[in-house]
Amino acid sequence: MDTLERLLMRISRGLNYLATISLLLMTLLVITSSVMRYFVGRPFRFTEELVALLYMAMVYLAIPLVTARRTQITVSVLPERLTILLAGLLRVGSALVMVGFCTWFMIEALDFAEYSRRLSSRTEQFDILLWPWMMLIPLTLGFTTLIEIFHLFRKPASSTGEPGQGLPVGDGL
């Protein structure tokens, strides 16, 4: 299990590095386009299209690492107050919802990407093929589904408190 976990984390980190590169490229494009607009008087026409594609890539490339590290926003009020058995059932239910959603979204996105490929859809200004960008969605969500399934069969990390205990001061509840 440790080997598989390390592999999933390495791939997730690699995708996150690509997301970071996408963010840097977006920033450079916006800055360069602004300089071109205000100092040269002629901005790049393709900046908005390319920034939108890079933003979409950044978001979907970052999802696997967040899922692998379990650092997404969670509502822990209910699981912390339940018995271990009920909290485990809630964890399994949560994972199944995530797997179901990712699978459904992946299938729909794959259909859209395939349709875009058949039409050879391109952006208006820069004439970039859209389907390779669209394929990022099903690929990253498929990988995220694998990560979630891995976590489903992995023993959950022990919590610091016992179920049924009060929350620490400062939790706001």
Image (cartoon, helix red, strand yellow):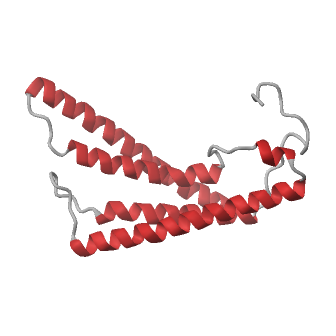
Q: Would residue 170 be found to the left or right of residue 22 on screen?
A: right
**Residue 146 in picture, x, y percent from top left:** 60, 66
**Residue 125 in picture, x, y percent from top left:** 15, 51
Depth check, front residue: 109 or 57: 109
Question: Taking the image as drawn, is residue 2 in sight?
Answer: no
What quarter of the picture does the N terminus occupy? bottom right
Q: Would residue 16 be found to the left or right of residue 118 on screen?
A: right
- Residue at image position (22%, 42%) is 47
Depth check, front residue: 73 or 26: 73
What quarter of the picture does the C terminus occupy? top right
- Asked if 80 appears above or below 170 in the picture, the reply is below
Residue sitting farthest toward the bottom: 118
- Residue at image position (75%, 44%) is 76
- Residue at image position (49%, 65%) is 105
Q: Give the number of marks.
A: 0
Which quarter of the picture shows residue 122?
bottom left
